[in-house]
Image (cartoon, helix red, strand yellow):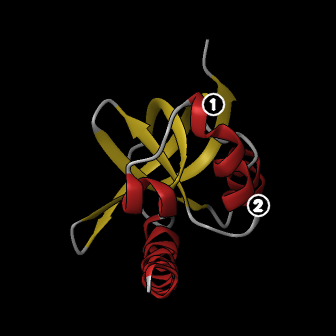
Amino acid sequence: MQRTWQIGLTVLAVGVISGLMWSARAMGKTDAPHHTLTGEVLDMSCYLTAGAHGRGHAACAAMCLKAGEPAGLLVGDKAYLLVGSHEHPQAYEQVRGMAADKVTVTGKLVDRGGVPGFVVEKVARAQ
């Protein structure tokens, strides 16, 4: 039963990511301001279903991100769904390899249907 629920959540997340990526592409053609956020890289599946994050969850998060689960960024008590930029796709792929690390991302804030997202254009490990 729990596996079915996780599959449903994953399907929902993929739909949300697709919508945000479409939105991000549209926003890329505007003069939307760039923002910088610093926080912990999450795998959204474990974070949403169990609240899992932190160094103790790093190995699981890395495995989930490698398997294709959506990435997120925890900034304080707010989580953002991270999405790729068509102009800078390598930045999103790079952040996916930084599970549970503290990073600084630069890009554009997006929000669709109440889901806060962030279009990653640049990423670096936080100091």
Residue visible at 76% across and 60% down?
Answer: 66
Helix, strand or loop status at disc 2: helix
Residue visible at 44% across and 33% down?
Answer: 37
Q: Position of residue 64 (x, y in %)?
A: 67, 60
Q: Position of residue 42 (x, y in %)?
A: 53, 47
Residue bearing the label numbered 2: 66
Q: Position of residue 103 (x, y in %)?
A: 59, 29
Residue lying at the far front in this picture: please name it.
Answer: 1
Foreground pick, 87 / 74: 74
Residue bearing the label numbered 1: 101
Judge from the rendering whether residue 50 lies leftward or rightward of residue 106; answer left or right.
left
Amino acid type at mark 2: Lys
Is residue 88 visible to us here? no
Helix, strand or loop status at disc 1: loop
Amino acid type at mark 1: Asp
Foreground pick, 60 / 87: 60
Residue visible at 39% across and 63% down?
Answer: 49
Q: Residues within 10 Å of mark 2 (few under 14, many from 20)?
A: some
Residue visible at 57% across and 50% down?
Answer: 120
Measure the alpha-carbon separation of dots 1 and 2.
Answer: 15 Å
Above-or-below relation of 51 to 6: above
Judge from the rendering whether residue 16 lies leftward or rightward of residue 92; answer left or right.
left
Residue lying at the far left in this picture: please name it.
Answer: 114
Q: Which quadrant of the rendered structure holds the N terminus?
A: bottom left
